[in-house]
Amino acid sequence: MPLAPRRLIAHLDMDAFYASVELLRYPELRGQAVVIGGGRDRQPALQPDGTHHYASLRDYAGRGVVTTCTYEARAFGVHSAMGLMKAARLAPEAVLLPVDFDEYRLYSRRFKDAVRGLAPQVEDRGIDEIYIDLSEVPGAQHDAGAAAARALKDAVFEATGLRCSIAVAPNKLLAKIGSELDKPDGLTLLTHADLTTRIWPLAARKVNGIGPKAAEKLAGFGLHTIGDVAAADPQWLLANFGLSYGAWLHAAAHGRDERAIVTHSEPKSISRETTFERDLHAVHDRSTLSALFTRLCERLAGDLQRKGYAAQTLGIKLRFDDFKRVSRDVTLPAPIADGQAIRHAAGSCLKRVDLSQRLRLIGVRATGLVPTSDAASAEPQAPPGTRAAATRPALMTHKWQGELPFFDPSTKT
Ligand code: DCP
Ligand code: MG
């Protein structure tokens, strides 16, 4: 009887993700301490000679925190979630850049698409990390996934110009711990045989699922490392941490985890956006803008149709030349997926915006997604009361909340 292939689970995490995306835009900052954080309105000023004037961290005053920073900044002790004022004391020379989530989402999509092109079994875990099941990837069983992981790193770099760290392990739990072990630009192979040498010496907190509170409680009992937890009497763990969490702690500390890769999740929204090569004006560049807008709507329609959804709500997002953002949306009497209908709905949103300023970016977003098989029954002529959509008033319009992300925010775990 052929043996079942052993599980080869990879965890991929982008290196200094937001900071690295910013370095693509400002390559002259490569090699410097760069901190991302604070408000989003302070883009580096472009000077007449074509160079940028960057804000220095030492000039920062306020209560913002570090979102992330380059490894050069980390060498000074700066890290995510640290107050910017404190960071400024550690690395006053560091450059401070504002966050630009739209750009990070774009690169997030790019690196994930690149990975899916080589290994389709992908679980999305947030903006900069994914799990990948390499078990069935051709050749992966012969070298514990080493060549596949290298190919993934190369594909991600090719598609984005960004580096990432990958660990391949027998399960998600070990892969997640492993991807941090050789950061940045790491490629780590872990087997159960590495448990005692590479995993047990680590702080208990490194296990995804042991949060700050649990770690504190463990430390109160003198259990600091993963090895300490592994050595603890399982019955004692159950008695002190509850049946379910106690049992999980014991299994996790021994590197046991049977969770499968979850490749499918229903999208909450589908969006398309484009940043113009030069800022465009609604009047002076009317035809260009109109053509771009139509194409965006057609692309969104294509995405919806390919994925089998129709949208109950259509929205637009604009970003002006001073980086100010505006969004509007419209809820429709029945879900739509066709390019012309989307263009019409998005156009009605556009009419509600003051367009006297030049535009830098335009986006269209579909929400209230209904699988197309259901959408047919949501037509207005359907018997009254069969679906809420059929009895809605013709148009309901409202503003997107100021900071609502353009598509679902990715959560870090
Ligand atoms: N992030 C955030 N708030 C935090 C931590 C991170 O908004 N407290 C954002 C910024 C990061 C991104 O999420 O760029 C990914 O988080 P990571 O923890 O993976 O950190 P980095 O990718 O920046 O660095 P590393 O190389 O350590 O992965
Ligand atoms: Mg990362």
Image (tube, rainbow, N blue to C red):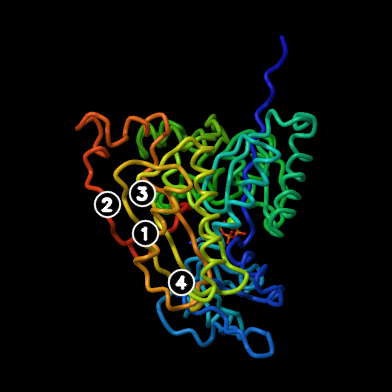
Find the distance from the CA under tag 2 to the CA under tag 4.
41 Å
- Using residue 168 as the reference point, say whether residue 294 is left or right of it: left
Q: Secondary structure at mark 1?
A: helix
Secondary structure type for disc 4 = loop
**Mark seen at residue 313:** 3
Q: Residue type at mark 2? A: Leu
Q: Which residue is mark 1?
A: 348
Quickly name the residue at label 2: 395
How far across and down, in percent of the image, does residue 246 sit? 41, 36
Q: Closer to us: mark 1 or mark 4?
A: 1
Residue placed at 70% from the left, 51% from the top?
A: 156
Q: Are marks 3 and 1 in contact (CB under 8 Å)?
A: no
Q: Earlier in the sequence, mark 2 or mark 4?
A: 4
Label 2 CB less than 8 angstroms from ligand 1: no
Instruction: Judge depth for marks 2 and 3 and give the one in front.
Output: 2
Cβ–Cβ below 8 Å for labels 1 and 2? yes
